[in-house]
Image (tube, grey):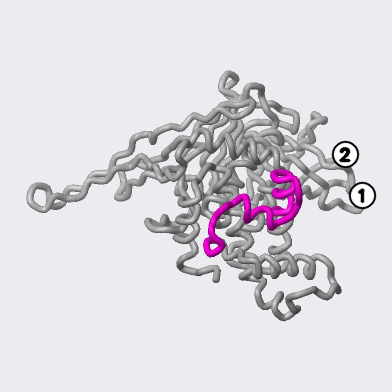
Amino acid sequence: MTIWRKTLATLREGRALPGYFKPREMEAKVPGVLNWSFERGAELELIGDTTGWPEMGAPQFVVHGWLRQGVQVSLLHTWVKRTTMATQVIALQSSTLALGEHMDHGTCWPQAIYSTANLSEWRRDTGLTYSRPAPKVRPKHVRVEWQPPSLDDVKVRGARMTFGGESHYSVAYAADWSIATWQDLVVNPEQPITLADGWRRFASPLLNLMSFASDRPDCIGREILVDPERNRRVEIWRQGRTVLPREWELIGGYLFHAEDLSDYASAIDMWWTLDEKLRPALGLFADHINHGTSYSPARFLTLYTAMEAYAKERHGRNQVRLLRQFAGVSQTATGCTDEALRLIGASRRYFAHLGTQPNGPTVDEIEANVVLSTRRASALMQACLLRELRFSTGEIEKVLNTYYSRWPLS
């Protein structure tokens, strides 16, 4: 295992790493110990004279560090967590950690790589082939091979993107060998991008698409910025919820997969264009999905807000009823009958305006049906987005009927 991989593995396991650190604007380094967890972010305990460092309450700043064996790190969005009585800084907190190179918010990169927990299962192309034993010829012979999966190049505004697969194998003088595979999105923008630009223009649309397609929680699990000509590469870790890839399901599990798109490149370009135009509607829709199997009035309001924003920007008015007309599918596919839409509208007014008595459906009906109203509204939004991706009416109804067959919307 390389020094780089050992460093990442140590931090992921929650173990502390010693090093030397300094604010970007200063020269003198101070010894310290760095810890990382995705729940709390980066925590840096300093040991030494921190005269001249930002004080408690100062704006967020950037800290550069050198870990053991010379591995460079940068703590972005850093603030002072604790000081001594003599105003010496002894603890810092950061929500974003850059590993591999020193960088700041203005550093530009000519290439970026992103992946999510659900991307590999959505594309379903591992590159692995498996030969079973032949009972008569080779009864105990097993063969596993890997070849790079097929690539899908997509041109979007301001960049060329490539979807493809990678692998990491462990082969040694040992009893166990392994091959791990995953899918990545490699972005080559026409002009170098900053960390924030990359997230807004590429990572966020990818995450929103995967949340929609899988209809399950997701997160950006791999974020890498690269400058091939200068041989620079930095891996970004962000504080927040993490989602691990699950065991694949052969039947069902996702709303749709990559192979269900009739024209992959056109559909991806269309999604990126839609995401930019409707921002932040699709992000809010993904936030609703990230609640998983937990339902609440807050989740319902997040979903309804996304639907209103989508309806207003795409169809001129923020009326959810317009979405049923645009989707153009049978009411049984989404469960959004006239009565169901009245209940959804009354639920929005009741939950958004506390203390307001609803017209039509009673409070008991609204509260008893918050789960069903959320699921029906979500299915209606799914139907509209499938329509955006050029699914036909019959295809949309088939997708929804199959997906909701195990938990009907009626």
Residue nearest the observer in this picture, 38 or 70 = 38
Residue 83 position in % (x across, y down): 86, 51
Up the image or down, 352 lies above or below 327; here it is: below
Specify few, some or many for label 2: CA neighbours under 10 Å numbering under 14, 14-19, or 20 or more.
few
The residue beneath circle 2 is 51
Query: Which of the 4 image quarters holds residue 402?
Result: bottom left
Please state the extent of the stretch shown in magenta in the rendering: 306-333
Specify few, some or many for label 1: CA neighbours under 10 Å numbering under 14, 14-19, or 20 or more.
few
| Residue lying at the far left of the rendered structure | 136
Residue 217 position in % (x across, y down): 58, 56
The residue lying at 59 percent from left, 48 percent from top is 385
The residue lying at 50 percent from left, 58 percent from top is 400
The residue beneath circle 1 is 86
Q: At numbered mark 2, what does the secondary structure look like: helix, strand or loop? A: loop
In the picture, which quadrant includes the C terminus?
bottom right
In this rendering, would 21 be left or right of 403? right
Residue flagged by tag 2: what amino acid is it? Thr
As measured in the structure, the alpha-carbon distance from the residue carrying label 1 to the one carrying label 2 is 10 Å
Residue flagged by tag 1: what amino acid is it? Ala
- The secondary structure that most of the magenta stretch takes on is helix
